[in-house]
Amino acid sequence: MDRRELLGSVSIFASLEDKELDLLLQATTTKRMKPKEVLCRKGDPGNQLYGIMAGSLKVTTTGTDGKDVMFGLMGPGEVIGEIALLDGEERSATVTAVETTELLTLHRRELIPFLEKNPRAAIGLAGVLAARVRGLSDRAEDRQTMPLPGRIAKRLLSLSETHGKRPIVGGPVEVRMPQQDLADLVGTTRESVNKQLRAWEEEGIVELGRSRVVLKQPESLEAVTAMFEL
């Protein structure tokens, strides 16, 4: 995949024509990150927009107890840094590479004039912002109304679609994530997540490994989610 294809895969630029992509491409650079490398920290200046071309990033903030709390995992085709970029304020969270990650980077001084001249890209960015707000709203609603088994099942299914891998072609999907990170995403403790996963493992629904969950019976997890969404 060449750089134009990579740029076109980023959601907010997907509707642009080749001519428009070529113009934007001239203003971009790429950045390669190692696992656990920090992209930006909460409070840093928000001058750049990042499109994830390969790999994944986790988004964390500091909880009331002073510990880092993960509230997002992002993968290829997603954009990060758009809020601080548009309002010119500081970064609202810390972003770290989960694995080897390749980013497309666009500076604010280049993006803002481009958006002014290309309304389709501006509309695409508005769509990204709307989806981000909707996702946060849905997660907050789940925490208030959905019991823990439903929240864990729903999150595992979502992660399997966006970040899941099949070690064996045609085999079950594997989600690589420490249980503490999964607990942060669903708003509970690691111990509670581990207890539920162990119960599902005994039923043959999942298989646990070091920092990974293999979804052996995703239809069972779908049934759990559906039961609590009625």
Image (spheres, grey):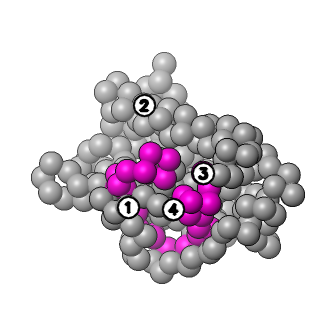
Quadrant holding the N terminus: bottom right
Spatial CA distance of label 3 from label 4 is: 11 Å
Give, as a three-letter code, the residue at label 3: Ile
Pointer 2 residue: 137
Give, as a three-letter code, the residue at label 1: Pro
Spatial CA distance of label 2 from label 4 is: 25 Å
For disc 4, the neighbor class at 10 Å (few under 14, some 14 to 19, many from 20) is: some
The residue furthest top is 230
Residue depicted at x 19% and y 59%: 67
Q: Quadrant of residue 66?
A: bottom left
- Earlier-in-chain disc, 1 versus 2: 1
Q: Nearer the viewer, residue 108 or 69?
A: 108
Q: Quadrant of residue 75?
A: bottom right
Count of marks overlaid on the render: 4
Q: Nearer the viewer, residue 140 or 24?
A: 24
Q: Position of residue 81 (x, y in %)?
A: 48, 55
- Earlier-in-chain disc, 2 versus 3: 3
For disc 3, the neighbor class at 10 Å (few under 14, some 14 to 19, many from 20) is: some
Residue depicted at x 52% and y 28%: 226
Q: Is residue 64 left or right of residue 69?
A: left
Pointer 3 residue: 112
Give, as a three-letter code, the residue at label 2: Ser
- Region of the chain picked out in magenta, as a range: 84-112
Pointer 1 residue: 45
Q: Position of residue 64 (x, y in %)?
A: 15, 48
Spatial CA distance of label 4 from label 1 is: 9 Å
Task: Verify whether residue 109 appears in magenta.
Answer: yes
- Earlier-in-chain disc, 2 versus 4: 4
Task: Tell me the number on the disc at residue 48.
Answer: 4
